[in-house]
Image (cartoon, rainbow, N blue to C red):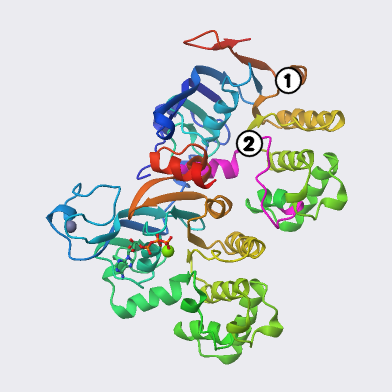
Amino acid sequence: MIQIDGLSKWFDLHIANQMHVKPLRTISFDVEPGKFMGLAGPSGIGKSTILKCIYRTYLPSEGSIWYDSAVWGKIDLATANERQILHLRRNEISYISQFLRVIPRVTAVDIVAERLTARGVTRADAIEQVKLMLQRLALPEKIWDAFPATFSGGEQQRLNIARALISQPRLLLLDEPTASLDYRTKTVVLDLLHEAKKNGTTMIGVFHDLEWLKQIADDTVTLDPSVHAAPLQQV
Amino acid sequence: MEHLQININDFDDELSPFDGIDHTLTWKDEPLLKVRRLNKKYGSGCMLCESEHGMSEKVNRCPNCATVWAMRNVSFDLYPGEILGIVGESGSGKSTLVKSLYFDEVVDQGEAYLQAYEKQDTNIFELSNQQKRFVRNHLMGMVYQNPLLGLRMNVSSSGNIAEKLLAADHRHVGFMRARASELLNQVEIPISRMDEAPKRFSGGMQQRVQISKALANRPPLLLLDEVTTGLDLSVQAKVLDLIRRLQRQLGVAMLVVSHDLGVIRMLADRTMVMRNGRVIEQGMTDQILEDPQHAYTQLLVHSLL
Ligand SMILES: Nc1ncnc2c1ncn2[C@@H]1O[C@H](COP(=O)(O)OP(=O)(O)OP(=O)(O)O)[C@@H](O)[C@H]1O
Ligand SMILES: [Mg+2]
Ligand SMILES: [Zn+2]
């Protein structure tokens, strides 16, 4: 489903005395369709950088990211044009970060439903599905129609998860999706991820808690700071 | 951006395993608006500044002849239903760009093509005045920072909209009233106030009337120049919200000019950075904000975020 080949990323900061920052040395790994690939390694090693390169929030500096898209078949996400990436983000690739990009004055229900209506699902059907999802994530019903700007970190994170999972993405990128959740909600999220996997979603994820990672990951790439050229071990 | 970088043929023995359909055939992604090498100068120009690399990117005024280059080789594509943000400091040429597209300013050189127009292959700057009026009335809407430019302050809100409908040859009074109330309702102006003049409205309401007027003839393209600048923060949020909702509901494409990266972050799918009349960088909005490539964009992002 995804083949990462010699990916690296550096930042040339032209301000601050021409700093050259290289958070990610060369990395390569493959993920089979419907599998969960965990990313592990110490803080600052570049786990989030990998995810952001795949989502193209960062422009990869070197290497390729072959992705098997439903629309075009294989496509290199590292060099695909912006219009293609936007199309994939709308239809195939979702990303759950630790933070919700809060949009003022759009209700929780609508933020999630938007993902479905953008694809042509009727509003009524979308809201039906969204409510089921929010219920499972135990988001208190009284805040469904409120604006998420005022939500707690954990509530925003659940909304984020709902938003990403509702559209049954083909590829799901997860960056510490459960960081601010309590034990019970974490379990629900894990269940939802298992379900998504059953439905064929391929996932690449970072969990700071390795016990949780073990429960869902089929395979793990551990990034190792001591291996200079290829900080990669396929476990 | 010019051509698709899909190497599907490299893998033709390994077609998409999912449905066997070659979706490359159904992937149509034609720009609504193509803009090529727009130039606008104030002054006569000279040998130095007229030559391609004669003038530093760090200024827009020619050191030799004092000509101001408000736009220098501006090119971009805007796709149907997308929001393209245009960001840059004061004087970078953002307003000049949208005003030129709306024919409020005359460009010196350059081309623009509108796919929604029957003469898709004609540079809109070479149209006759009558054709330009048609494009302005039917295919574009403009929302100015200053509502005085977009509204008649002493004419009722419904009258403001009717003016735009009349320009598109609507004559039926009943239709015009119905359309005006529909439009004002869409921007959350109470119907009970449709016959009030905008001069009695707050700044936020005036901007909403301006937006509804710009949308009167259902154009596929809306140009918005700093529409929330100067409004209170809470009013700003409401107007931005409205813009976002309209874009989702109507699928209208927008060029959103702002010097405020917060506005751009909230609205734009893609963003273009301007400086001294030139396009410095363009990309997906999150990428421009989190991984800006150009030194100037890095400064902009770090000082304004
Ligand atoms: N009529 C004019 N005569 C001379 N110079 C002009 C004229 N109109 C605009 N300019 C110059 O053209 C340049 C671009 O102006 P423009 O209004 O497009 O900037 P802007 O990016 O919209 O700025 P702001 O953020 O302040 O609105 C500026 O240097 C401006 O001084
Ligand atoms: Mg301006
Ligand atoms: Zn000159």
Residue B102 locus on image (x, y percent): 39, 70
- For the residues beneath circles 1 and 2, the answer to whether they share a chain is yes
Q: Most extreme residue toward the left, as rendered?
A: B47
Q: Position of residue A94 (x, y in %)?
A: 63, 38
On the picture, is B282 further left or further right than B180? Answer: left
Residue A66 versus residue B18: which sits nearer the camera?
A66
Camera-nearest residue between B303 and B200: B303
| Image quadrant where residue B91 sits | bottom left
Q: Residue shown at 36%/57% (left/top)?
A: B34
Alpha-carbon span between mark 1 and mark 2? 17 Å
Q: Which mark is residue A213?
A: 1
Given the image, on which type of amino acid does mark 2 rest? Answer: Tyr
Task: Please determine whether, in this image, residue B67 is positioned above or below residue B12.
Answer: below
Q: Earlier in the sequence, mark 1 or mark 2?
A: 2
**Residue at image coords 35%, 45%:** B2
Left or right: B71 in relation to B136: left
Residue at left offset 33%, top offset 80%: B130
Q: Relative to residue B287, is residue B129 depicted above or below?
A: below
Q: Which residue is mark 2?
A: A95
Q: Quadrant of residue A39?
A: top right
